[in-house]
Image (spheres, rainbow, N blue to C red):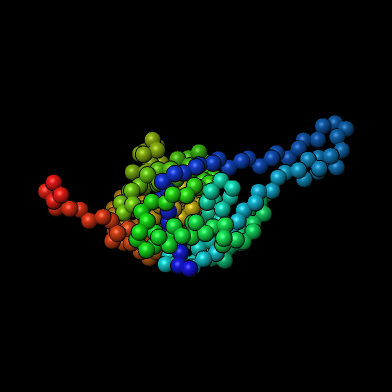
């Protein structure tokens, strides 16, 4: 199966990361055993994942009960997370793999599947702004900073882009430097250029003025 790419999501569910339970503070006379039993009751979240090849290189996808949790360039990183159990299942991610195929074939310009975005308030603002960048277009880091009402925070925007957990779907490849250069990208500048060229090549052709009137 040929898959890969970054999704532009039509419907997005953003979810704050749940805070880790605080270490219980032992009250006077409380036993250590009782505190350990408390931490043992922390629920483990079930995550499905798969590794796949794509025109953008090997990818790692992970799915929670809320939606796509990760889409990373696969460099052999372990499939794991805090308070999570990861189970390999290409079947569970079949819909995501199919939409990625369609994206790389140039037939899909927007992704329809839910996301489970987790990060700080600032990161979530940045990632939502990325999702507003139309297919085939680009924005600068300064544009994103202005869009989230932090006009001087373009460097912090760059750091948030660097921590984007869902590459291609949350299209950080559409963000460029103010001088028009590609700047950085987690998948490498050659992959960033390939994604931008793919989208430009598959934009709908504009009809000449008066055609169809």
Q: Nearer the viewer, residue 15 or 213?
A: 213
Q: Quadrant of residue 198?
A: bottom left
Q: Residue at x 35, y 39 (%)?
A: 146
- Whether residue 192 is visible, yes or no, is no
Residue pushed farthest left? 210
Q: Position of residue 82 (x, y in %)?
A: 65, 50
For this view, does 168 lie left or right of residue 120? left
Q: Is residue 61 above or below residue 161?
A: below
Q: Nearer the viewer, residue 11 or 125?
A: 11
Q: Position of residue 169 (x, y in %)?
A: 44, 53
For this view, does 101 lie left or right of residue 142? right
For this view, does 114 lie left or right of residue 27? left
Q: Residue at x 57, y 66 (%)?
A: 76
Q: Residue at x 56, y 53 (%)?
A: 63
Q: Quadrant of residue 77?
A: bottom right
Residue pushed farthest top? 28
Q: Quadrant of residue 48?
A: bottom right
- Whether residue 169 is visible, yes or no, is yes
Q: Nearer the viewer, residue 88 or 71?
A: 88
For this view, does 86 lie left or right of residue 55? right
Q: Residue at x 54, y 57 (%)?
A: 93
Q: Position of residue 182 (x, y in %)?
A: 34, 58
Q: Position of residue 45 (x, y in %)?
A: 65, 48
């Amino acid at each position: 199966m040929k898959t890969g790419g970054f999704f532009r999501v039509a419907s997005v569910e953003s979810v704050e990361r749940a805070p880790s339970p605080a270490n219980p503070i032992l009250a006077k006379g409380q036993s250590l055993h009782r505190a350990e039993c408390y931490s043992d009751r922390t629920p483990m979240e079930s995550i499905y994942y798969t590794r796949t090849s794509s025109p953008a290189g090997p990818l790692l996808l992970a799915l929670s009960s809320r939606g796509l949790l990760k889409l990373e360039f696969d460099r052999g990183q372990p499939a794991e997370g805090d308070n999570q159990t990861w189970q390999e299942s290409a079947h569970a991610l079949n819909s995501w793999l199919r939409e990625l195929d369609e994206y790389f074939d140039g037939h899909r310009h927007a992704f329809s599947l839910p996301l489970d975005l987790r990060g700080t308030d600032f990161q979530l603002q940045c990632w939502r702004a990325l999702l507003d960048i139309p297919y085939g277009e680009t924005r600068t880091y300064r544009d994103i900073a202005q869009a989230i009402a932090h006009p001087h925070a373009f460097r912090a925007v760059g750091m948030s882009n660097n921590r984007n957990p869902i590459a291609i779907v949350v299209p950080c490849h559409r963000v460029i430097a103010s001088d028009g250069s590609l700047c950085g990208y987690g998948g490498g500048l050659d992959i960033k250029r390939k994604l931008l060229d793919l989208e430009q090549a598959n934009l709908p052709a504009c009809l000449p003025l008066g055609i169809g009137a």
